[in-house]
Amino acid sequence: MRASQILSFIGLATTLILAPVTSHAEPAMVGNPAPDFTVQDSSGKSVSLHEFKGKTVVLEWFNQNCPFVKKFYSKGDMQRFQSTATNQGVVWLTVNSSAEGKSGYLDPKSGTAVRSEMGMNSTALLLDSDGKVGKMYGARTTPHTFVVDPNGTLAYAGAIDSTPSTTADDVPKATNYVMGAIDAIKAGKVIDPASTEPYGCSVKY
């Protein structure tokens, strides 16, 4: 075998070895296009991010057993945020990425029940039990939140607010980063901060 053929073979082998590593997508980054997805909601309907192009979209990671989530739902704060946003034409998608057998797992029947029991006002409750959407976005906690602008760009990622506690009385006193991002997009202003450290319970993939 000639030297040039050997080098060519080595190069091909190296490419094949590296291909699986480089083929894995990186988690979503603020300023980049938000990863598209299609997933079923609690009613059995398929929901795709691209169908909301032209609208601001909020992604709220959710686990009904998490005390940090209960903080926002126990006194109606999250429901109020959802209503305020959706009344402005924002699409609010609550996402459950708990795997079957893990804390917070929801199938369509239990998802419908939880949505009703908690009085959710989000556009839909997405059932991401295989964790595909959560891993696309790098969702780490409940509630980890993301805001996608009308151009399809990931505009905000991180905590929902500035107070990492489980106390419901802290919600009105905190700076709400998600609602601030929604207002900034509507006003054509720069989102500040555009990225924060998420807090809460770990997502149960």
Image (cartoon, rainbow, N blue to C red):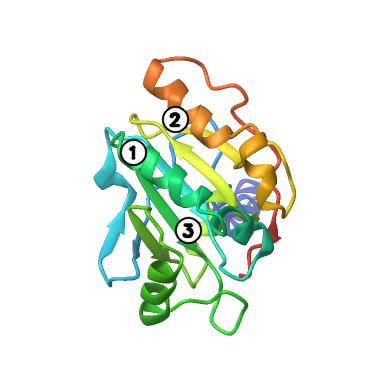
Pick the front one: 60 or 161: 161
Nearer mark to the viewer, of 2 and 3: 2
Pointer 2 local density, CA inside 10 Å: few below 14, some 14–19, many at least 20 = many
Pinpoint residue 34: horizontal percent, then vertical percent.
44, 40
Badge 2 or badge 3: first in the primary sequence: 3
The kind of residue tagged 1 is Val
Tell me whether circle 3 and circle 1 mark residues in contact (CB < 8 Å).
no
Mark 1 crowd level (few <14, some 14–19, many ≥20, 10 Å Cα) = many
Secondary structure under badge 2? helix
Callouts 2 and 3 close, C-beta under 8 Å: no
Q: Secondary structure at mark 3?
A: helix
Residue at image coords 68%, 63%: 67
Q: Is residue 63 above or below residue 35?
A: below
Which mark, residue 90? Answer: 1
Residues under labels 1 and 2: Cα distance? 8 Å
In the image, what residue type sits under mark 3? Val
x then y, percent, for residue 150: 33, 31
What distance separates the C-alpha of mark 2 from that of mark 3?
A: 22 Å
> Image point 62% across, 46% down: which residue?
4
Which quadrant of the figure has residue 12?
Answer: bottom right
Where does the image place residue 126, in percent across and percent down from the top left?
Answer: 40, 63
Task: Decide which of tag 3 and tag 1 comes sooner along the chain.
Answer: 1
Q: Secondary structure at mark 1?
A: loop
Residue 1 visible from this viewpoint: no
Q: Which residue corresponds to mark 3?
A: 133
Q: Residue at x 52, y 48 (%)?
A: 77
Question: Of the residues shown, which amino acid type is indicated by label 2?
Answer: Ile
Circle 1/circle 2 CB separation < 8 Å:
yes
Q: Which mark is residue 182?
A: 2
